[in-house]
Image (cartoon, rainbow, N blue to C red):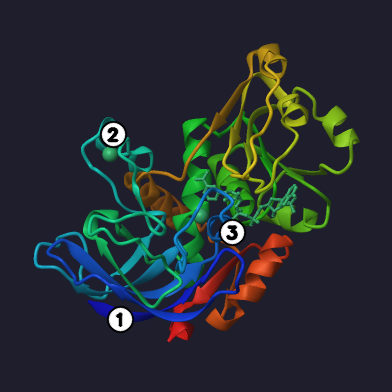
Amino acid sequence: MLTVNAFAAPSSSDLLEPVTITRRDVGPKDVLIEIKYSGICHSDIHTVREDWGAVQHPLVVGHEIVGLVAEVGAEVTKHAVGDRVGVGCMVDSCRECENCLAGEEQYCLNGNTGTYNVVDSDGRITQGGYSTHIVVTEDFVLSIPEALDFAAAAPLLCAGVTTYSPLRYWQAGPGKKVAIVGMGGLGHMAVKIADVMGAEVTVLSRTLAKKDDGLRLGADHYFATEDPETFNVLKNSFDLILNTVSAPVELASYLALLRRNGTMVNVGAPAEPLPLHVFNIMENRRSFAGSGIGGIRETQEMLNFCAEHGINPETELIEAAYINEAWKRLLAADVRYRFVIDAHTFA
Ligand code: NAP
Ligand code: ZN
Ligand code: ZN
């Protein structure tokens, strides 16, 4: 076992603090990664705060990981020592079910092994990327193309793929009007990716405070949802609405913005249920859907797409000691647009 430095949440309410944890020995198909940068996703906070259910604390979160391969097991063929690699929200899955065989391990019918807070095959709870090292089976380790800025690449592993996957599935592209609700970590990636895919992109943010940024990132239009007039002006407009908001939204108002056959996809994951009135989807033959992260193959495709098109997340690099302040600011939507932790400060 390898003892490594990390930052853990001791409970659902205490501040995160430095700890040491152990990583399993490098098995034949394992890769030991020296973590360089680790992004902060809103899901880290939802999980620790037990918004989605009970958690076994202390817990190390973090599932936007990039680093260098430090050691490989004897049977590893996909990665070599020194390679730039990444790990996202999953570190394993059953690999046998229909969904795994389709390359959609995120929907593993036996439950994928999340990067943190899930019982691993060795019976221990997985611990995430707010740490100096992690051991992951090679099939769940991504390659980070050279063209991507290394620190900025970390958020692609969750925020990038979580927005890329539904934008691809629902065919955001030329001739499609796409609205992105909420311009945080996920939302700002969605704007960049949908723009590069060729869609006409509208941001629906609570206020106009980030309008200049939104237009710079690739949006064609930007509206404030705190202005009721927005919901009149944009009625029956969009083919696709991607909701990235971490809190409940009033579904009826947003569904009314979909044109005929339009789809609203929820990737935001508030703790509370969202009441849906069926008349809001019967009209215009609308759909309401959800989407969860992306499979390993699609995550690599997204990384290559971002490298090819020069898509880099907008990040604020922080030291580990700043994590608690960063969480406070993230909850106040005071981040442009993703915090990334410099992992050598865990040491
Ligand atoms: P984030 O950076 O905090 O962004 C969320 C954005 O939602 C904020 O920037 C803000 O945008 C808006 N917002 C926040 N509170 C709001 C409120 N009370 N009412 C209305 N709007 C509000 O979070 P994130 O990391 O992008 O994650 C967003 C959500 O997606 C979280 O719930 C996270 O758990 C979830 N998630 C889901 C998946 C998946 O697989 N489906 C993967 C990753 C994350 P404006 O200031 O522009 O209004
Ligand atoms: Zn995430
Ligand atoms: Zn499976």
Q: Compared with residue 240, is residue 48 higher up or lower down, i.e. above or below?
A: below
> Which of label 1 and label 3 is nearer to you?
3
Q: Earlier in the sequence, mark 1 or mark 2?
A: 1
Tell me, yes or no, whether the two marked residues, 1 and 3, touch with CB atoms within 8 Å: no
Quarter occupied by the N terminus: bottom left
Residue placed under numbered mark 2 in the picture: 102
Nearer the viewer's eye, disc 3 or disc 2?
A: 3
Please tell me which residue lies in front, 321 or 228: 321
Report x, y in % for residue 161: 47, 49
Residue kind at label 1, given as amino acid type: Thr
Mark 3 and mark 2 lie on one chain; the one further toward the N terminus is: 3
Q: Amino acid at mark 2?
A: Ala
Residue identified by numbered label 3: 49
Secondary structure under badge 3? Answer: loop
Q: Is residue 258 left or right of residue 314?
A: right
Q: Is residue 219 visible?
A: yes
Q: Would you identify the image quadrant in which residue 109 lies? A: top left
Some atom of ligand 2 lies within 8 Å of the CB belonging to the residue at label 1: no
Which residue in the protein does label 1 denote? 3
Q: Judging from the image, what secondary structure is the residue with disc 1 in?
A: strand
Using the numbered discs, state the Cα–Cα distance from disc 1 to disc 3 in whole angstroms.
26 Å
- Looking at the rendered image, the disc whose residue lies closer to the viewer, 1 or 2, is 1
Name which residue type carries label 3: Arg
Q: On screen, 126 above or below 218?
A: below
What is the CA distance from the residue labelled 3 to the residue labelled 2? Answer: 33 Å
Neighbour class for label 2 at 10 Å: few (<14), some, many (≥20)? some
Q: Quarter of the image for the C terminus: give it.
A: bottom left
* Along the line of sight, the residue nearer the viewer: 318 or 127: 127
Q: CA distance from mark 1 to mark 2?
A: 36 Å
10 Å neighbourhood of mark 3: few (<14), some, or many (≥20)? some
